[in-house]
Image: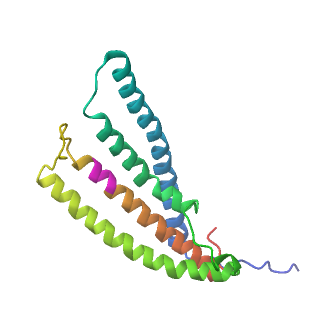
Amino acid sequence: MTKPETVAKRMPWPIRKYVWLVDRLGLAAGYVAMALTFVLLAILVESTAARLFFGVSHIWTVELAMFTMSAYYLLGGALSEQGDYHVRMDLFYNRFSPRVRAITDSVTGLFVIFYLVMLFLAAVSNTHWAWVNKQVNFSAWAPPMTPIKIIMTIGIFLMMLQVIATFFRDLSKALNRSLE
């Protein structure tokens, strides 16, 4: 008779599936954000070439570059959270044991989730207002603001989902459970 193998306690199936799915979504959004660096490069090279070789200055270049950079920043947030690339104040944190770090991250994660939920609700409201009122930017080009606000809302939503997944990951470490 063989000894029964000890099975590691696992987090519930819906939580494991949620973390897996959100990690894939965050990775996909991160790849889109990475591709936007090439779009930004193309915008800036075109603007420079038009000015240097043809003496033409486009009124839309700076704003389109800002919109592209905003999309890059907002869509890359989920991947940044997933990879733990954010800045952390390590005054005491590095002295904690891995379990205490997980507990600390779980507690602070709840505050971040609350903040992102409020930010997401404001973004939805702001995007709706821009859509209904056909908001444009106050500039000579006057581009519509709805597309960048939709991207902003999606980016905040993905970041919120990723922070919730990170909360579950930290909670599983704090409870000494597996997500696999």
Of all residues, the one furthest to the left in this rendering is 133
Q: Residue 72 versus residue 51: which sits nearer the camera?
A: 51
Query: Is residue 27 at all visible to an observer of this figure?
Result: yes
Task: Residue 171 in the image: state x and y as whole percent.
Answer: 57, 79
Task: Residue 113 in the image: state x and y as whole percent.
Answer: 42, 74
Residue lying at 32% horizontally and 16% vertically, measured from the top left: 54
Using residue 58 as the reference point, say whether residue 116 is left or right of it: right
- Was residue 149 drawn as part of the magenta stretch in this picture? yes
Using residue 85 as the reference point, say whether residue 125 is left or right of it: left
Please identify the dominant SS of the magenta region. Answer: helix
State which region is magenta: 148-152
Task: Residue 55 in the image: state x and y as whole percent.
Answer: 30, 19
Please say if 170 is above or below 34. below
Residue lying at 38% horizontally and 26% vertically, measured from the top left: 46
Q: In which quarter of the image is the N terminus?
A: bottom right
Please say if 164 is above or below 26. below
